Image (spheres, rainbow, N blue to C red):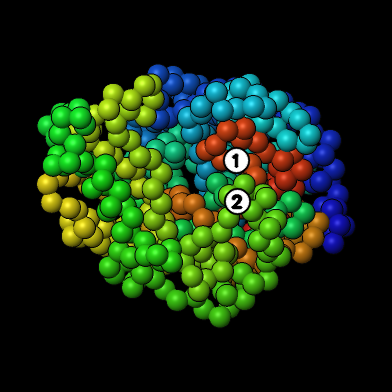
Amino acid sequence: MEHGTDSGGADVTTSLQAAQDTIIDQLSEWVRIPSVASQPERALDVERSARWLAGAMREVGLRTEVLRAGPSPAVYGEWLVDPSLPTVLVYSHHDVRHAKPEEWMETAPFAPVLRDGRLYGRGASDAKGQVIAHLWALRAHLGTRDDGQPAVNLRYLVEGEEELGSSHFAALLESDPERFACDVVVFSDTLQWKSGNPAVVTSMRGMTGATLTVTGPARDVHSGAVSGPAPNPVHALVSVLAAMHDDEGRIAVPGFLDDVDELTEERQQELRDLDFDTDVWLERTETRSVVGEPGHTIEERLWARPSIEVLTLLAGDPTGFPRAVIPSEATAEISIRTVPGQHVDRVAEQMRAFVAEQMPDGVTYQLDIPEESGQDPYVTPPGPAAEALVRAMERGHGTETAGRMGNAGGGPAELLGRVLDAPVLFIGTGLPEDHWHSSDESIEVQMLLDGAASIAFLLEELADALR
């Protein structure tokens, strides 16, 4: 299959290719707004980002409103054509992760630059580029419509605290269920398989975090005065962290793996259908080696098995000349990814019991697991909407899909599906090599255009599939 070989396809892909420079300029303008929700001094920039998006939505023809999700601004847009038509709600986010400018080599984080077919800048891929793809998909879709209106009713909800865990998002959804009512949710905050070889994302892992702080001495104490008999919170912390996995890399928290649903043969085959090459994977992700749970493929470890990762360790003097002290405290930030069968409350209970059992004598500790912002895993149910997504992606990318995949990261997909009582479809424009959350984040321009084309076709396909 080639781009534009089906009815209406040429108009969509041609219009998007013709608008490429304008699309990049618009995305660049938005990327320049440092909407870092985790930094209080950037709160005004998050507000500016929301207003920027609301304006861009109005240019396409949407009626917009900036809503409040706790302290953060969420942007709502709608185009309601006819109550008899299917209603599609699009979800994404406009806040971005903070950046370490000293680690960026291609450009400063909020000074976007186009180079070698990629636009560099924080948020270019995660997830401002994905939102821009939706706006230009709507433009392209409207260009194929004789009446100048979309084939479905449209609602857009783009939150401003996803990178903080969407802690106020449930309250926003539940505050006005009629406003967000829909027949299907289109979730755009995901990665694709690879350029020119798309795969349909049909699952998303759940996620919760944990902060473990261990306290030893009442204050930092010179090691030359007390080393030996004094409790060291670093030793205690790392012993607990190390015990979370066995020597082969399998999670060793009692009961943690017991709740995991076994993969069906159909799902195993879908993952095997992907054109996966370990060496290529290592090159694309820059992870250098493969570790993890034995007896499972890399694809299964990514998308169908849970994980516990230590993301941050803080103790002593991480910068500057060391003071030669035994620190009073040591802290670890832990990321927990879950899969079908697991639930945040149960995982939190297992982690608390494990830490209590493993913590050495002589220290105290505090384990914080914010269950209220935890996210359970989600699997897209089979049906007409899922089949429409496959057709749309094949039309948009001009090739058959390469099988099925999952999304290794998390997001409020399960929450959206449960509260709105609608299936959730995943369609994203990111790639593993886009360096989400890291330095030199970027988006591949062709993937952005192909993704926009796929979204445009999805509106058409859903109109037919959900009548």
* 129 in relation to 373, above or below: above
Task: Identify which amino acid the numbered label 2 is placed on.
Answer: Arg
Residue 13 shows in this picture: yes
Residue 46 lies, in percent from the top left, at 46, 25
Which residue is more in the foreground, 79 or 344? 344
Residue at the spot x=79%, y=34% of the render?
116
Which residue, given by chain and number where applicable, does mark 1 sit on?
A: 435
Which residue is more in the foreground, 276 or 131? 276
Q: Which callout, 2 or 1, points at the residue further toward the start of the chain?
A: 2
Residue at the spot x=67%, y=31% of the render?
120
Disc 2 crowd, CA 10 A, few/some/many (<14, 14-19, 20+): few
Callout 1: SS: loop
Callout 2: SS: loop
Is 219 situated left or right of 439 in this image? Answer: left
Is 134 situated left or right of 346 in this image? Answer: right
* Image quadrant where one finds the C terminus: bottom right
The disc placed on residue 288 is: 2
Which residue is more in the foreground, 53 or 284? 284
Which numbered disc, 2 or 1, marks the residue closer to the eye? Answer: 2
Task: Identify which amino acid the numbered label 1 is placed on.
Answer: His
Q: Looking at the image, do the residues carrying marks 2 and 1 touch, with CB atoms under 8 Å apart?
A: no
The disc placed on residue 150 is: none
